[in-house]
Image (cartoon, grey):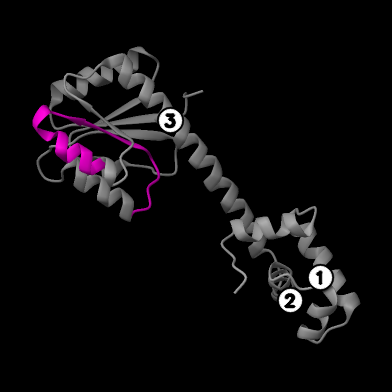
Amino acid sequence: MNEDAVIHVVDDDRAAREGLGFLLGSLGLRVEAHASAAELLDRLDCAGVGCILADVRMPGMTGLELLDELGRRGCALPVIMITGHGDVPMAVRAMRAGAMDFFEKPVNGMALVGRLNEALALSRSRAEAARGAAQVRARVDSLTAREAEVARAVLAGRLNKQIAAELGISLKTVEIHRHNVMDKMGASSAADLVRLLVAAGWTET
């Protein structure tokens, strides 16, 4: 299930990176190690399935600053923090900023692996949702200008007769455009069409 997933281990401590890499690799998980947050950001593909396991306190960009930067980039990969005892308050702040969890050193390996599997499942779900949204947007982009006008009217709850009057076209023309919209969007009903349009980011206004 996780063959295509990548766990990004970010820690300036080489021994810590290698230790986590060995543990996770021995369990069949794919690991990429990074010596700094900057190195991770240079190599990271946010479109894939994976998660980030980052030390809180690192020279240069800290784990908390990394989390902020990932947010600015719109990166949806789940983040789990590793912290020393004195860094627990910082790790708590990271969770409030969107981190999924944090583990205190020395890390309980099996507990961490369990949480990482949950993070990968979450990442897979987010990736599938993003692909679905992209497909819906592509369908919307295939609509002609007139079809888009009819679609927006349907989204606003207008009846075919009302749409015809508002757009100054015949009822038959509205019906043809509406049929084309339903076909292009892959919608089976008006309610289904509305759901798809909302998923594409459309609103009634």
Q: For residue 33, what is the image quadrant? A: top left
Q: Is residue 65 left or right of residue 4?
A: left
- Helix, strand or loop for disc 1: helix
N-terminal-most mark, 3 or 2: 3
- Helix, strand or loop for disc 2: helix
User: Foreground: 131 or 68?
Assistant: 68
N-terminal-most mark, 2 or 1: 2
The disc at residue 177 is 1
- Helix, strand or loop for disc 3: helix
Q: In the rendered image of this protein, does residue 122 appear above or below residue 62?
A: above
In the image, residue 204 lies at what x, y percent? Answer: 62, 70
Between the residue at mark 3 and the residue at mark 2, the CA separation in whole angstroms equals: 42 Å
The magenta segment? 73-94
Q: Is residue 66 left or right of residue 48?
A: left
Between the residue at mark 3 and the residue at mark 1, the CA separation in whole angstroms equals: 42 Å
Label 2–label 1 contact, CB within 8 A: yes
Kind of residue sitting beneath label 3: Leu
Q: Which residue is mark 2?
A: 146
Q: For residue 5, what is the image quadrant? A: top left
- Give the label, 3 or 2, closer to the camera: 3
N-terminal-most mark, 3 or 1: 3
In the image, residue 132 lies at what x, y percent? Answer: 59, 47
The total number of labels drawn is 3
Q: Residues within 10 Å of mark 1 (few under 14, many from 20)?
A: many
Q: Which residue is mark 3?
A: 120
Between the residue at mark 2 and the residue at mark 1, the CA separation in whole angstroms equals: 7 Å
Label 3–label 1 contact, CB within 8 A: no
At 33% from the left and 42% from the top, the residue drawn is: 44
